[in-house]
Image (cartoon, rainbow, N blue to C red):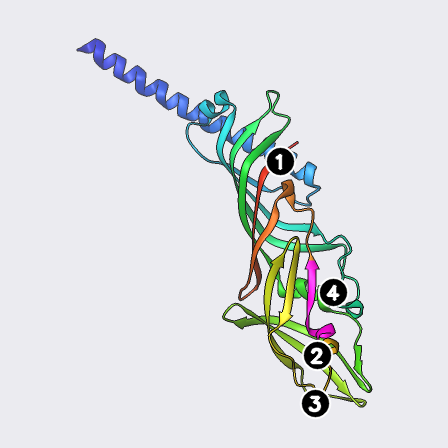
Amino acid sequence: MRALRILLIVTVILGGLFIIADRVAVGFAEDEAADRLKTNEGLATTPSVSIKGFPFLTQVVGGELDEVEVGIKNYEADTSGATGGTGTAGGTTPDKIRIDDLTAQMRGVAFSGDYSSAKAASATGTATISYDELLKAAKAEPVDVAGGVTAKVVGLSDGGNGKIKVEVEATVLGTKLPRPVSVLSSVSVKGDTVQVQADSLPNLGIQLAEDKVRLITDFRQKIDGLPGGIKLDKVEAAPKGVDITVKGSDVSLVG
């Protein structure tokens, strides 16, 4: 009986030591992965990396992690010189666009024997582009949409029911309208580009050709170079900005 008690005590102690060793190992691995990800992606701040599943050490022996969650607060994505507007009048957007709170869940993460690289079989995630940031894709010098009528987008905000409220400032025959004219717009994803298109045209006080007005109200923002090669999937207007979902396969986490 005494021997059994001793065996139980030893088992509990060894189990506790294993758990401690496992947690220490996973903490070290998370820190190392975060540092490498920061370097690989050229991030200004260190991302958060959380390795899911227990125990971690048995996953290491198997050469594959069940799930890894990555969080990046402010990610500067490439825009590849995308142009705003549906025509040439929209101007040129900045080379980068800031994406807030990018969180990605990577599943089936296999890594090399020397831990220099890691690739996920699949990944899904969410992020937000603020309205102020998205406005850069539309903001340009006032565009001449008809004789004596110029206009430009001056504001974006939540229009409710998944719509974006686009505010257009117009000058008609030398007189600026007393307040911006607003229109509700739909937002969608096509390939690697976020597109904003007015559901109806704003009343600028004078009859204008639709294609001319849409040079102002409609615009697009290309987003390229997301971490690990993940791609845009869906987009939806939200209170603080445009919420996007991303997905990918064979996504590079490290290396």
Judged by depth in the image, the label closer to the viewer, 3 or 2, is 2
Question: How far apart, in angstroms, are the residues tagged by discs 1 and 3?
Answer: 53 Å
**Residue under numbered circle 1:** 252
Circle 1 — which element? Answer: strand
Label 2 sits on a secondary structure element that is: helix
Alpha-carbon neighbours of circle 1 within 10 Å: few (<14), some, or many (≥20)? many
Q: Which residue is mark 4?
A: 84
Label 4 sits on a secondary structure element that is: loop
- The residue tagged 3 is 205
Which residue is at a point 45% across and 25% down the rendered structure image? 22
- Residue 87 placement, left or right of 250: right
Give the residue drawn at x 50%, y 23%. Answer: 60
| Mark 2 to mark 1 CA distance (whole Å) | 44 Å
Magenta stretch, residue numbers:
214-221
Instruction: Answer with left or right where residue 228 lies relative to residue 54.
Output: right
Residue topped by disc 2? 210
Where does the N terminus fall, quadrant-wise?
top left
Please identify, in this view, whether the residue under mark 1 or under mark 3 is nearer the observer: 3
